[in-house]
């Protein structure tokens, strides 16, 4: 029996040793995987650079302290190791005023190096930008998408620009976000431009974004909701397109124009009739009819938070839907096939609780299956493709 136990130990110990050697290698390789597209360590704006600078400082000081402490530990272990025949006890330093005072002074100086730029950075981040060039945007978080109203951008008839999920901003301009939630707590986060900020129902929070350079049309800056907000939290994303001054002005002008309402008894009119009957229960769309009259169809509601009124709707504004690259809160590439699949069975693409929708009480938890036929879906998609 004893021999069997010894044999078992002899057989298992090398395996354990090999495992202990492999695990650190695996962890090291995992740490070298790269930062990915959503990282706060590659800032693309002055505010994010300040945050990254504080991170670099803390990392540098923490590394210095780690090396110092580990070095002293190794030195002490070697210097005061047990030697054969040496029974002398090391000198006891407990209660040493020099060590205690030195440790306190060292810690205070170290924390001061960290605290001063941290506090200064927090004050700078929370400062309200001033000047004629500041762009003000109201942000409303919904389960599970983002609504943006450009309160500074107005059409001749007084309409403001409202869009969803894809945020367009000019380069090198302070963009001041005034944010609230229509339902639960969300968190707005575009890591290369600024830190996270909670978006709370009944409260107003603010965040400033400043981007260095324009982004390529097909490479917007990624962001997302960073506070768990329900079933489709992971699919509540943000795409930030940065333009130069001329490009941003052109985008605004295009977005403020109404889309075209199909003329009666035309090829697109069947899709419009279906859309106007069903889709405008949640979505808004601003259209110009054949007589030149501009009308906004769909529900309009207002959310008041801290005495600030946010104009909102139950679903994203679709006036210029196909000017966007994505849908489903920045989750899916926008094309006719994807959109048809979405209309046919939304929950097959994105987890939602549409069966719990209660429009009367402002509760919307996703797009329902409208039960449209294949022909109706094709007609609606053909219509939406014209709204660019």
Image (cartoon, rainbow, N blue to C red):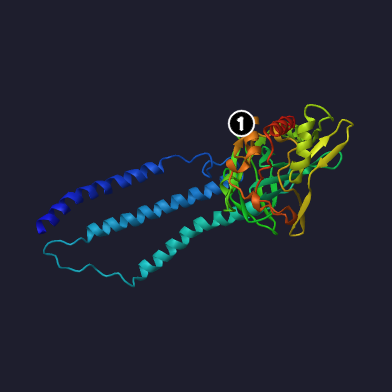
Residue 284 visible in the current orientation: no
Quarter placement of the N terminus: bottom left
Q: Nearer the viewer, residue 229 or 206?
A: 229
Can you say whether 275 is above or below 13 in the image?
A: above
**Residue placed at 12% from the left, 55% from the top?**
4
Q: Nearer the viewer, residue 38 or 183?
A: 183
Q: Nearer the viewer, residue 119 or 348?
A: 348
In the image: residue 312, left or right of residue 199: right
In the image: residue 289, left or right of residue 343: right
Quarter placement of the C terminus: top right
Residue 226 visible in the current orientation: yes
Q: How many numbered marks, from 0 up?
A: 1
Structural crowding at the residue carrying mark 1, measured as other residues with C-alpha within 10 Å and reported as few (<14), some (14–19) or many (≥20)? few
Task: Identify the secondary structure beneath mark 1.
Answer: loop
Can you say whether 202 is above or below 145 in the image?
A: below
Residue 3: horizontal and vertical position, in percent? Answer: 9, 56
In the image: residue 254, left or right of residue 216: right
**Residue placed at 65% from the left, 51% from the top?**
355
Can you say whether 216 is above or below 172 in the image?
A: above
The residue identified by callout 1 is 218
Residue 332: horizontal and vertical position, in percent? Answer: 60, 37
């Amino acid at each position: 029996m004893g021999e069997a136990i010894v044999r078992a130990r002899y057989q298992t110990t090398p395996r354990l040793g090999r495992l202990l050697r492999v695990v650190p290698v695996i962890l090291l390789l995992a740490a070298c995987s790269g930062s990915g597209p959503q990282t706060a360590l590659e800032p693309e704006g002055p505010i994010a650079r300040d945050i990254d600078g504080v991170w670099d400082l803390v990392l540098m000081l923490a590394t210095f302290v780690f090396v110092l402490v580990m070095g002293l530990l190794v030195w002490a272990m070697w210097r005061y190791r047990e030697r054969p025949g040496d029974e002398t006890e090391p000198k006891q330093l407990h209660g040493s005023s020099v060590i205690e005072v030195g440790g306190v002074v060292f810690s205070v100086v170290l924390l001061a190096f960290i605290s001063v730029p941290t506090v200064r950075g927090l004050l700078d981040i929370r400062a309200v930008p001033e000047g004629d060039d500041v762009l003000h945007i109201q942000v409303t978080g919904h389960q599970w998408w983002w609504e943006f109203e450009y309160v500074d951008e107005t059409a001749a008839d007084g309409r403001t620009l409202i869009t969803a999920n894809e945020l367009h901003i000019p380069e090198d301009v302070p963009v001041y976000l005034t944010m609230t939630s229509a339902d639960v707590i969300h968190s707005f986060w575009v890591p290369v431009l600024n830190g996270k900020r909670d978006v709370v129902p009944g409260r107003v929070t603010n965040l400033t974004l400043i981007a260095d350079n324009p982004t390529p049309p097909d490479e917007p800056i990624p962001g997302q909701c960073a506070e768990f907000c329900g079933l489709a939290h992971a699919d509540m994303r943000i795409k930030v397109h940065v333009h130069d001054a001329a490009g941003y002005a052109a985008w605004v002008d295009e977005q403020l124009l109404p889309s075209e309402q199909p003329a009666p008894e035309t090829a697109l009119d069947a899709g419009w009739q279906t859309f106007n009957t069903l889709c405008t229960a949640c979505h808004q769309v601003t259209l110009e009819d054949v007589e030149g009259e501009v009308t906004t169809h769909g529900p309009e509601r207002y959310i008041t938070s801290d005495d600030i009124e946010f104009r909102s709707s139950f679903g994203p504004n679709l006036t210029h839907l196909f000017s966007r690259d994505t849908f489903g809160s920045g989750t899916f590439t926008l094309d006719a096939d994807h959109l048809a699949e979405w209309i046919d069975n939304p929950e097959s693409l994105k987890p939602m609780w549409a069966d719990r929708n209660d429009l009367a009480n402002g509760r919307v938890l996703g797009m329902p299956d409208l039960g449209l036929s294949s022909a109706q879906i094709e007609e609606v998609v053909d219509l939406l493709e014209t709204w660019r």
